Image: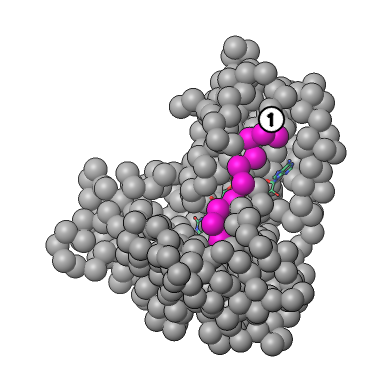
Amino acid sequence: MLKPAEKRAETVFDDFKTSYDKKQALVEANRCLFCSDAPCIKACPTSIDIPQFIRKIATDNVKASARTIFESNVLGMSCARVCPVETLCVGDCVYNEMGVPPIQIGKLQRYSTDKAFEEGWEFFEAGPDTGKSVALIGAGPASLAAAHELRRLGHACTIYEKRDYVGGLNTTGVAPYKLRADKSHQEVEWVLAIGGIDVKTGVEVGKDISWADLEKQHDAVFIGFGLGVDTKLGIPGEDLDGVHGAVDYIERFKLGEVSLDGVEHCVVVGGGNTAIDAVREVHGLGVPIVSIAYRGVEHKMSGYVHEWHAARTESIRGVWQVQPIAFEGEGKVTGVRCQCLDDDKKPIPGKEVTLPAQLALVAIGQAKLGELLSGLDGIEIERGRVIVDESGATGRKGFYAGGDCANGGKEVVNGVAEGKLAARSMHDYMMGGS
Ligand SMILES: Cc1cc2nc3c(=O)[nH]c(=O)nc-3n(C[C@H](O)[C@H](O)[C@H](O)COP(=O)(O)OP(=O)(O)OC[C@H]3O[C@@H](n4cnc5c(N)ncnc54)[C@H](O)[C@@H]3O)c2cc1C
Ligand code: SF4
């Protein structure tokens, strides 16, 4: 399992949310009303007891606060940084209804979890050995959460990861101003400190090892392989130098260096969160003029409004109601030719515009990987998504799934919640023998 290299383009980014010092954390924690039936807990997919961990900060018992967080969410350190709290816990804090700024739950969570990492506090140990073993596919948040829970229950775990790096999109995809690759790697090491989780990197399941072999070698299988490569537009010029899938390009600069010499303009195609991340990142890497090109109107973008507003304050431009029809250039991209669209997203005859671009990123979604399982009887796939029941079980005995491959692409915290749920269900299955 490789550590991210020292020299990575992403290191030019600072944290976009600064950490609290002790005084600030105490002031903020003491604002909490410690609501009974707290809506912030219900808004958290991992059901962290938020008033409880905040109360422990207020009484200066940071270790107990961190324990409360990690008991519910072992990836609580990265979630404190990457969760869209504005739409989850913070968005549901009762203060919003009183016209008072909501409690900064993410920043308080970061205060406690960072301290736990700094101090090297350990909270967990493996359960007594059950003699059972589980294969987990992918070393992203879903599998890591599942493996940790399975170890607490005493099962041996082997994670198979096709990349040389661990952490999944937390390492390769999340915006560096939220979480850098080395911090994500550190979190994986922290999770693995429980012991008994064997991580085999550079092993692609379905290619380097068959599903049949996995099934023979293990008592249960957790599928946490996330999503696949960037979806292409399928228009002329997409193979030109300087045209990339956004997730692929983000991975390049998170794990290494990229050359932006001569890149004055960048166009990012799409209107979702990946597109918004990409424009901010490319601008932060030093490209002076960065635009998002979206086929709808600004207020109908699918990405988070708060993230787009942040992008706008960084001078990112929006080009609305356009559909790319070709990447122009010889050898290298020089522009993105777009068809202009009306309010119903229909082409306006004869109206085209070419946006200059020496770098163009396509952020219109990622492939679903369900077809990798097509040879396995009982597993149901719907438009590439692995279908699971409320316990995380697929239709094949002993096979469970969670995270992006099952939910179609949500957030890190959803992957953690689903991985943990599936781990408990696998435990019942293996111990009950049903
Ligand atoms: C650009 C981008 C930015 C994001 N930003 C945020 C954010 O700010 N906040 C947030 O909460 N969420 C964010 N997300 C979403 C979040 O990263 C995912 O929801 C989360 O990582 C899903 O976890 P997972 O474990 O299901 O999958 P992944 O993190 O994708 O991990 C899957 C792992 O499986 C491996 N794998 C795939 N196929 C195989 C195979 N055949 N054999 C072995 N290994 C395999 C992959 O290499 C990968 O490491 C972002 C997503 C993207 C694309
Ligand atoms: S809703 Fe807000 S005030 Fe109430 S417990 Fe949660 S964070 Fe505290």
Residue drawn at the location 58% of the way across and 72% of the way down: 336
Q: Magenta segment range? A: 363-372
* Residue that extends furthest to the front in the rendered view of this protein: 350
The quarter holding residue 255 reads bottom right
**Rendered view: 268 above or below 65:** below
The quarter holding residue 1 reads bottom right
Q: Amino acid at mark 1?
A: Leu
Residue 375 at x, y percent in the picture: 72, 24
Does residue 371 belong to the magenta stretch? yes
Tag 1 secondary structure: helix
Question: Taking 146 as reference, is 100 left or right?
Answer: left
Pick the front one: 273 or 222 = 273
Residue 190 at x, y percent in the picture: 65, 54
Residue drawn at the location 73% of the way across and 80% of the way down: 259
Residue drawn at the location 71% of the way across and 53% of the way down: 166
Quarter that holds the C terminus: top right
Residue 372 at x, y percent in the picture: 70, 34
Does residue 191 belong to the magenta stretch? no
Residue hosting label 1: 373
Residue drawn at the location 52% of the way across and 28% of the way down: 388
Pick the front one: 308 or 331 = 331
The quarter holding residue 341 reads bottom left
Pick the front one: 161 or 302 = 302
Numbered circles on residues, count: 1
Question: Taking 245 as reference, is 5 left or right?
Answer: right
Residue 143 at x, y percent in the picture: 63, 41
